[in-house]
Image (tube, coloured by chain):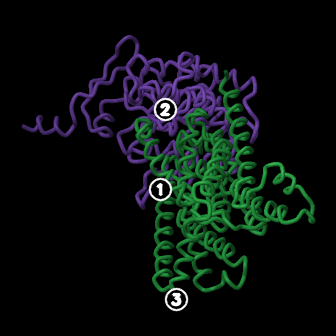
Chain colours: A green, B purple
């Protein structure tokens, strides 16, 4: 089978798996609903009763967010690894996740989140925007990969410090608990409002990230070689940074910080696409969606009623898995 | 036609002038060897011509002002082989070579038949056909160098700039590469290669440009550029210059300072 045919088959399989997990995600929940009933309720009209309410207002937004957040993490992880040519790059690297979390924490801390339903995600988006402006300003138009990594680390550390300060000064233990729980990352109890809030940023971010696939291929040979082959490095950097910020900022705003998906999924799929960065992007977006949907199904199956947080599960499974991946591919990493 | 004209280039890196007013031109059919000691500014000169670092001065590519060109336009006219042989991901040899076609392709289009012909031709010239499905990061240094050269050939530009392309190659592949560059010049292209092996440069290049402290010290046919005095004043070595098999032979014997000391005794 030729390389391109294998690649198309992979994408088809990933798309089928994503679709299957999406449907499965719709059928899992505390309310025991038969599959046929749930599908009927999903497409039913206004008067379909409580079943329709559960399907359309609770499970559908959760499944859609799982799909979108997962795709965002997979895609941005693949883009950042390709752009920085660093296999350890991940969506949180730019500091967007940490500052978006900080924005959310401030919203919870000040009570802004309680008085205004969209206060939390909007504050998180604002936090993410600040991070990207700082990182891009520090890296400059000609800044290299290393400057971006260092600026991202600095911004992340500062945001983490401010988050700790908020916890430290938290007026009551309930606020601190709410902050802690929010930071663990979850898709539970989200509404279609969250979907509509996050979707525009994510779609714009995806478009920006997807547009630089070709340039990432060329960057395989280094910055100078890529520039000599007609790649506009400033444009690629802006698209990578702002695309990540828009999509990951929106993902963090609605779901909290969810780790390891954006790091592990590109690694897992890279050998299957012949390591070509442009082909890794769609594969990794689908792979990320699969992993996140599966994880979100698992948290509901493993501990129904205990509200096991999604971010906890991805970290518990992701970290040892990543360790195994590093062990297996350590020769190629060096 | 003149493929490249550079006039009064000035580059400062960290406040230190690296290029000091070199002016030169490269025409069709020329294979120019860019020689000079370490730190003379050879790489900087090539990078400045490509617009990879900011430089003052006038650069014209195929008669057109370089500042008015987009990166893609320039990429269709000049191919560049950097000194660092970097391949970031374990991609196949064929994929690396096909990257050379990037400046010729519209944003989202795949490779067309003409692209494939160029890629095959480049792989054939660098004897890479059997390597096509090998993982490029697992190749030896010399093989990797050939893959990257093939990539530059696939770019099919009228002018090729190569930064120390022979470094790390065995004598047979060094000579094959010099012959290839001479062939390219024979086809009417221009090649500029920075080189450290002066005998190799003298034997194959049609012209040598000797660079020292960011300025051009000599520019002309190899036999005129390479003299014992220049070997002493520019490279700081006493050298044997002879002739063998119809080509100039340059063999550095000792550092000039050491000779001066021993002569003084």
Q: Secondary structure at mark 3?
A: loop
Using the rendered image of the protein, determine whether residue A206 is visible from the camera's viewpoint: no
- Which comes before the other along the chain, label 3 or label 1? 1
Mark 3 closeness class: few <14, some 14–19, many ≥20 residues within 10 Å: few
Structural distance between the alpha carbons of marks 3 and 1: 39 Å
Q: Name the residue carrying label 1.
A: A146
Q: Quadrant of residue A16?
A: top right
Instruction: Give the image location of residue A116, x and y in percent.
Output: 72, 82
Looking at the rendered image, the disc whose residue lies closer to the viewer, 3 or 1, is 3
Residue indicated by mark 2: B193
**Residue B208 can be seen, yes or no:** yes
Q: Give whichever of A207, A56 is nearer the camera.
A: A56
The x and y percentages for residue A184 are 55, 66
Q: Who is closer to the viewer here, A268 or A39?
A: A39
Mark 2 chain: B
Residue at 22%, 37% in the rendered image: B256
From this view, report whether residue B67 is shown above or below residue B265.
below
Q: Dot 3 corresponds to which residue?
A: A171
């Amino acid at each position: 089978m030729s390389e391109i045919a294998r690649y198309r088959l992979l994408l088809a399989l990933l798309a089928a798996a994503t679709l299957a997990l999406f449907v499965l995600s719709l059928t899992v929940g505390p309310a025991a609903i038969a599959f046929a009933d749930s599908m009927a309720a999903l497409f039913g009209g206004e008067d379909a009763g409580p079943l329709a309410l559960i399907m359309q207002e609770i499970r559908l937004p959760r499944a859609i967010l799982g799909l979108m957040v997962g795709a965002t993490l997979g895609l941005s992880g693949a883009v950042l690894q390709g752009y920085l040519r660093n296999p350890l790059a991940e969506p949180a690297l730019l500091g967007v996740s940490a500052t978006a979390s900080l924005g959310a924490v401030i919203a919870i801390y000040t009570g802004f989140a309680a008085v205004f339903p969209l206060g939390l995600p909007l504050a998180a988006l604002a936090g993410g925007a600040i991070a990207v402006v700082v990182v891009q300003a520090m890296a400059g138009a000609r800044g290299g990969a290393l400057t971006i990594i260092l600026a991202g680390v600095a911004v992340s550390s500062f945001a983490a410090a401010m988050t700790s300060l908020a916890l430290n000064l938290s007026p009551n233990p309930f606020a601190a608990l709410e902050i802690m729980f929010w930071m663990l990352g979850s898709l539970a109890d989200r509404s279609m409002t969250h979907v509509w809030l996050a979707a525009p940023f994510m779609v714009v971010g995806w478009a920006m990230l997807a547009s630089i696939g070709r340039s990432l291929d060329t960057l395989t040979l280094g910055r100078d070689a890529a520039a000599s082959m007609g790649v506009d490095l400033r444009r690629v950097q802006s698209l990578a940074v702002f695309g990540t910020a828009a999509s990951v900022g929106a993902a963090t705003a609605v779901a909290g910080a969810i780790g390891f998906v954006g790091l592990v999924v590109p690694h897992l799929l890279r050998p299957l696409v012949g390591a070509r960065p442009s082909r890794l992007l769609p594969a990794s977006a689908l792979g990320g969606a699969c992993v996140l949907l599966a994880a979100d199904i698992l948290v509901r199956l493993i501990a129904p009623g205990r509200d096991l947080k999604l971010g906890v599960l991805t970290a518990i499974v992701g970290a040892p898995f990543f360790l195994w991946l590093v062990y297996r591919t350590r020769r190629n990493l060096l | 036609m003149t493929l490249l004209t550079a006039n009064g280039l000035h580059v400062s890196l960290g406040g230190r002038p690296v290029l000091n007013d070199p002016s030169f031109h490269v025409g069709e059919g020329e294979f120019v060897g860019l020689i000079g000691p370490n730190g003379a500014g050879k790489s900087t000169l090539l990078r400045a011509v490509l617009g990879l670092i900011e430089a003052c001065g006038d650069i014209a590519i195929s008669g057109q002002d370089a500042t008015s060109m987009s990166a893609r336009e320039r990429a269709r006219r000049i191919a560049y082989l950097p000194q660092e042989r970097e391949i970031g991901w374990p991609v196949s040899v064929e994929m690396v070579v096909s990257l050379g076609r990037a400046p010729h392709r519209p944003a989202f289009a795949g490779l067309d038949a003409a692209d494939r012909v160029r890629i095959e031709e480049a792989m054939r010239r660098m004897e890479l056909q059997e390597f096509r499905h090998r993982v490029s990061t697992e190749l030896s240094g010399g093989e990797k160098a050939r893959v990257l050269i093939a990539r530059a050939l696939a770019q099919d530009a009228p002018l090729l700039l190569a930064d120390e392309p022979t470094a790390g190659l065995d004598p047979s592949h060094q000579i094959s590469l010099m012959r290839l560059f001479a062939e390219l010049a024979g086809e009417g292209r221009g090649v500029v290669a920075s080189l450290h092996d002066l005998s190799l440069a003298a034997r194959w290049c049609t012209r040598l440009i000797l660079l020292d402290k960011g300025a051009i010290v000599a520019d002309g046919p190899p036999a005129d550029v390479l003299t014992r005095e220049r070997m002493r004043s520019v490279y700081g070595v006493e050298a044997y210059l002879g002739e063998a098999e119809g080509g100039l032979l340059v063999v550095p014997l000792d550092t000039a300072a050491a000779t001066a000391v021993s002569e003084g005794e």
